Image (cartoon, rainbow, N blue to C red):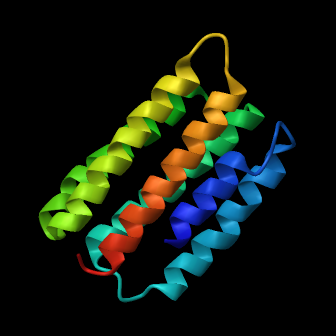
Amino acid sequence: MVAGLFLLGACTGSSGDTATEQTEPTTTTTSASRSASPTVIPACRDVVEDAQKFAAEIGQLSSGKSTLTDVRKSADTLVATFNEAKADVGQEAQQSFDKAQQQVTKFKGVVSQKPVDTAAIRQSARDLAAALTDAIRVCSQGQ
């Protein structure tokens, strides 16, 4: 759940401000989520880690330190992790993973649009963060 919340901050915490504001929460939350959830099953832990990496790429994209190709690659990795994790989680978590995957795909489409629609990117990031938060919450509850 913490990873989803930090993703929201990383994706929507700025309206064009510096990259430091977007990437610092990633570092802080990464340590907190790992130490706060030592009993999370490995499949969920993998999802959390790849969601954090994806959020970091998004933050770096907005600062010019990353490319759209990097974001797509990270998104594809996250989707693959969801697919692998589905074998180890319950039906409710699988459904949450499916919803999060749909939001990842939607986000990839929104950030690829020309011209850039900042409002659409922010809304898609919020939707993505909510879906990831739910997926991680359900997974961590063993459902």
Which residue extends farthest top?
A: 114
Q: Position of residue 93 (x, y in %)?
A: 25, 65
Q: Does residue 4 appear to the left or right of 119 in the view shown? A: left
Residue 66 visible: no
Residue at point 45%, 85% (across, down): 37
Residue 93 visible: yes
Quadrant of the drawing holding the C terminus: bottom left
Residue at point 35%, 40% (across, down): 102
Q: Is residue 45 above or below residue 123?
A: below
Closer to the camera in the image, 128 or 17: 128
Q: Position of residue 6 (x, y in %)?
A: 62, 63
Q: Position of residue 112 (x, y in %)?
A: 54, 20
Q: Dividing the picture into quarters, in which one does residue 24 lie?
A: bottom right
Residue at point 71%, 28% (across, down): 118
Q: Dividing the picture into quarters, in which one does residue 116 lie?
A: top right
Residue at point 49%, 34% (across, down): 107
Q: Position of residue 9 (x, y in %)?
A: 69, 57
Closer to the camera in the image, 109 or 39: 109
Say how many tags the image has. Answer: 0
Q: Does residue 24 appear to the left or right of 109 in the view shown? A: right
Q: Is residue 53 above or below residue 28?
A: above
